[in-house]
Amino acid sequence: MVCNTLRYIEEKIMARTGLYKSDVKRARDSLLAQNTNPSVDAVRVALGNTGSKTTIHKYLKELEEEGNGADGRKASISEALQDLVARLSTQLQDEASARIDTFQLQSADKERQHAEVLTALHKQIESLNQRLQHADTEMQQESAAHEQVREALQNEAVARHTAEQQVENLRERLAENDAHRQSIEEKHLHAREALEHYRQSVKEQRDQEQRRHEQQVQQLQAEIRQLQQGMLVKQDDITRLNQEGARLAADLSHVHKALYDQQSSHRQLEQKIEALQVVEQHGKTLAAQLADKVTQMQALQSQLNDAAAKVDVSAGQVRDLELALAAANAKSASQQDVVTELRAYLETRDRPASGTGK
């Protein structure tokens, strides 16, 4: 019973730790019982092709020496137990040494990894410090640019206000010029209407006088024809005809006087026509002045358009500056967030590093 227990323990130990001397002895005894030479290869085959040939040779040599020294006496149970305990102690020491070596290797590996991680962290901290300095520099530059943009925006606002004031002044001048032009146009229209009315009245008066003169001439011609007929018919009424001739002469003088009056009236009409020509010349002068005013108004309108275009350009520049200011503010805020995150990250990294160092 004790032998079976020892054999079971030896099998478990061999299955777990390797080849033992008792295994080699048992295989050799089995070969000797079969009248087979217990060579190294034969013992290894009997052991199931397990174990090192060097170990088997060592154990066979020890068994041979033990067999020669004790004259074939078998080891007692206590010796087997002592041998088993010694082998277990040796195996435990070997395993403990192996584990200690493994732990030392793992510890050295972990120390090396910790050193590498620490070096990488230091490098990363230096890189982050450089990035932080660069970010601070960029933030200062952006602040300076932001201040410049703000000053430019203020200047553009002043220029825009000035331009708007100029536009307002130009609009007022344009309104005044429009009112003045409208007043001149009204005056010119009234003068033209008055001149046309005067021309119409003079024409009507001239036509009336012309018709009266033609009627008088026709009447005189009719009377002359009647006189001629009377002279032909009434040769005997020479005296009466002479009297009539004297009367006709008197009438003719009246007619001459009427013609003279008509010529005077005609001269007056010519004077009135000359006066009208002067009025017409004045109207032309007013028209020229009106054309000049229209030209000035067009020039003012062009200046107004240019000022409006400048205002539009200034408004576009102001909008661009506002956009640039908003972008600069956003970029400054983003860089400030990045700087805050970098500082928080550095503080988070520095705290574990400081704890490890302690």
Image (cartoon, grey):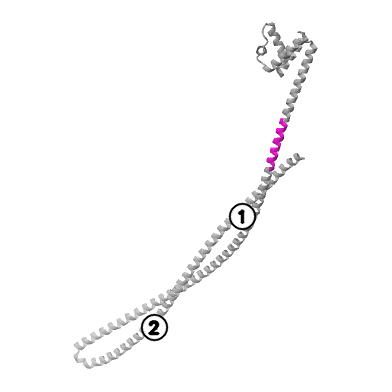
Task: Give the Cα distance between marks 2 and 1.
Answer: 78 Å
* Residue 325's disc number: 1
In the image, 175 versus 92, the foreground residue is 92
- Which of label 2 and label 1 is nearer to you? 1
Visible residue check, residue 236: yes
- The amino acid pointed to by label 2 is Gln
Q: Position of residue 284 (x, y in %)?
A: 42, 75
- The answer to whether 315 is drawn above or below residue 261 in the figure is above
Kind of element beneath mark 1: helix
Residue 116 counted in the magenta span = yes
Residue 292 counted in the magenta span = no
**Quadrant of the rendered image containing residue 171:** bottom right
- The amino acid pointed to by label 1 is Leu
**Quadrant of the rendered image containing residue 196:** bottom left
- The answer to whether 130 is drawn above or below residue 110 in the figure is below
Q: Most prominent secondary structure in the magenta stretch?
A: helix
Q: Position of residue 155 (x, y in %)?
A: 60, 62
Q: Read off the magenta span.
A: 105-122
Q: Position of residue 262 (x, y in %)?
A: 34, 85
- The answer to whether 160 is drawn above or below residue 54 in the figure is below
In the image, 300 versus 327, the foreground residue is 327
- Residue at (24, 92) in percent of width and height: 242
First of labels 2, 1 by sequence position: 2
Q: Position of residue 335 (x, y in %)?
A: 65, 49
In the image, 111 versus 343, the foreground residue is 111
Return the residue at label 2. 271
- Residue at (31, 88) in percent of width and height: 256
Structural crowding at the residue carrying mark 1, measured as other residues with C-alpha within 10 Å and reported as few (<14), some (14–19) or many (≥20): some
